[in-house]
Amino acid sequence: MNSLPGTICREWLKVYFSPRLHGKVVAMRKGIAVSPGVAIGTAYVIREIFVNPNTKRLEGSEITAELASYETARDKTAADLRSLEKKVAAQVGREQANIFAIHQQILRDGAFTNKIRNWIVQEQLTADAALHRLLGEYTALFAKTRDEYIRQRLDDIRDVIVRICSHLLDVAKLDQNSLKGPLIVVADELLPSQAVALGEIEVRGIVTQAGSQTSHAAIIARSRGIPAVSGVKGIIRAVKTGDTIVVDGRDGHVEVNPNPETLAAFRKLEREFFHLKDQLAENRDLPALTADGTELRLQANINGVNDAAAAHAMGASGVGLYRTEYLYLTHSDVPDEDEQYRTYREIINSSPNHNVTVRTLDIGGDKTVSYLGHDHQEANPFMGWRSIRISFEHPEFFNTQIRAILRAAADFPNGNVRIMFPMVTTVEEIRKLRAFVRKAYKALLAQKLKVREIPLGMMLEVPAAAISIDNMLELVDFVSIGSNDLVQYLMAADRDNPKVSHLCEPLAPPVLTLLHNVIGACNRANVPVTLCGEMAGHPKAFLLLLGMGLRRFSMSPAFIPSIKQLASQVTIAESEQILQSALKLKETAQVKKYMARQVEQLAPNLALLDI
Ligand code: PEP
Ligand code: MG
């Protein structure tokens, strides 16, 4: 395998530091590096209407068009709500569907719409500013009541307004021609639906004000291989659409309208980033082998069909994690069995070797859908009602998903489709899940539908499950380590809270000890084990996991070429030695420093792609 010249890295460092050495550092903003690389482009700021409504006064000639936009958004909202009510009643229950009947009543309320129309026509407000004002009025009114039931109606009103706003704010309609050059999207946080709409546009980089390593924006950026920085305080107000913006996704900083010298230095870096990506992508058809010829499986984490294409392009051998919740999160109502079947079929069809591990709905935590009873705030959502805990409580709904997966898998007898359950905590849950799938399988057989028995596995992301791994292994066909969650639960540090990100660290010594134990237990029991958390694609962590005996990795598609190259530079014996030395270190910072040196020695060119 061709290794890349180390000169790229040295040259790059020279360029990178030169503006500073000449004392011409321009103002920059710091955030969290979430997707590596360097990008320069024209800012496109997605306004979060409630944070920052468009307060401009309309010209007289704009009023009719603004009214028409509002009416269209309102009609689309009404259609969403009607469809949601029907589907939720059929799949989840009448009681849960009632909420959408109430939302339709709110939408039909004469006072609601008349106020909005009047403010647009008489006060020349934009539709989003009018909606913002209306929400303010209701909030003030409801604040006076002590009645909890009435207070909760405010949440319903807010929901309806958010829904109208999301139709007003249609990212897909962005007129890219009016903006110069490739775009850098700047947002408070990207909603899943916005992220999907961005699929239509050429985006070079993403910057968000909120968010973290594992937020939607980060996941989307990594799966598309574009640089991204999250958690940049105040960026929405500091940047306007049309500004020139630089995103440095390696160390998490952003520069707005940099001076010509800085811009030229970053342009050089950006070219090197593209060059490196192109060179690494040439690996795509080569097998993933270590320097001593041990075969590895490098698979992709995907959220939808576009990512399956990226998995192919980057040379993945399959999909190790398909996050099905994106199907629900980006759907304006509840996808029924046939819609799900068609989507899963398309995903399997477009994935390398028709090899796909489908994870059942992992909703809750940071991702919610209104029809599953998330009508109240949980004090600890990540430790509360999420994933299979929700699926168990809505058996009809869960059954729809399992049937759709089993039917789709049956269409690919030569593929390898597996079902994986998130957030498994106890042995009883695994028994119950297996019985559930068995029942769905038998029902499909009885209906004479095409069906096939497929492997059932667990995600290992709860420390309790890691501790009782031996008992779990008797009941599952495979294990996939969800290190994003496992690390946050083990370290008691929220994965999305930048204030504790120094604790939520995959290279922390206790995390390494636990992973070493779990991987050893799976290998001894001959149960296939993969790791599908973000650390699988990070060079430093990859070397350690290899030393622990892991041979299957699933990661954002864009990381596959660099990990393939790194693997080609190291033998198993060397990785075991590196692990032994790292396990002797007691502090995270020491592990990081030590591992940075190992990566630098083995593959110096990868510095630009490490975070
Ligand atoms: C994980 O927890 O590591 C994982 C892969 O799942 P998610 O990031 O979707 O929670
Ligand atoms: Mg998880």
Image (tube, rainbow, N blue to C red):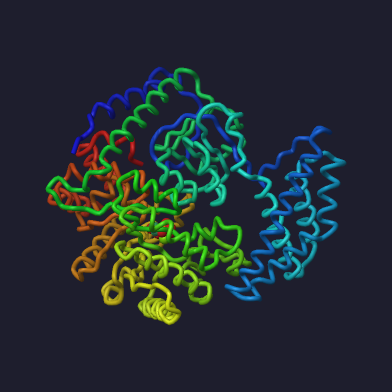
x then y, percent, for residue 454: 33, 70
Residue 461 visible in rendering: yes
Image region (quadrant) for ligand 2: bottom left
For the point 48% across and 72% down, which residue is it?
A: 389
Q: Nearer the viewer, residue 387 or 359?
A: 359
Q: Which corner quadrant of the image does residue 143 belong to?
A: bottom right
Q: Is residue 576 rendered to the left or right of residue 14?
A: left
Q: Position of residue 323 (x, y in %)?
A: 43, 58
Q: Is residue 27 above or below residue 196?
A: above
- The residue lying toward the viewer, choosing from 513 and 223, is 223
Between 8 and 465, the one nearer to me in the picture: 8
Q: Is residue 364 something one can see in this rendering?
A: no
Q: Quadrant of residue 564?
A: top left
Q: How many marks?
A: 0
List the single residue furthest toward the front: 448
The structure residue drawn at horizontal position 39% and vertical position 35%, both measured from the top left corner, is 37
Q: Position of residue 279 (x, y in %)?
A: 28, 33
* Residue at the image point whose x is 73% and y is 54% from the top: 75
Q: Which residue occupies 38% across, 39% down? A: 36
Asked if residue 195 is positioned above or below residue 608 in the image, the reply reads below
Q: Is 75 displayed left or right of 598 in the figure?
A: right
Give the x, y percent position of residue 381: 52, 64
In the image, is 291 to the left or to the right of 34?
left
Residue 428 sits in which quadrant? bottom left
Quadrant where the N terminus is found in the figure: top left
Left or right: residue 135 compared with residue 532 = right
In the depicted structure, whether residue 178 falls above or below residue 340: above
The quadrant of the image that shows the C terminus is top left
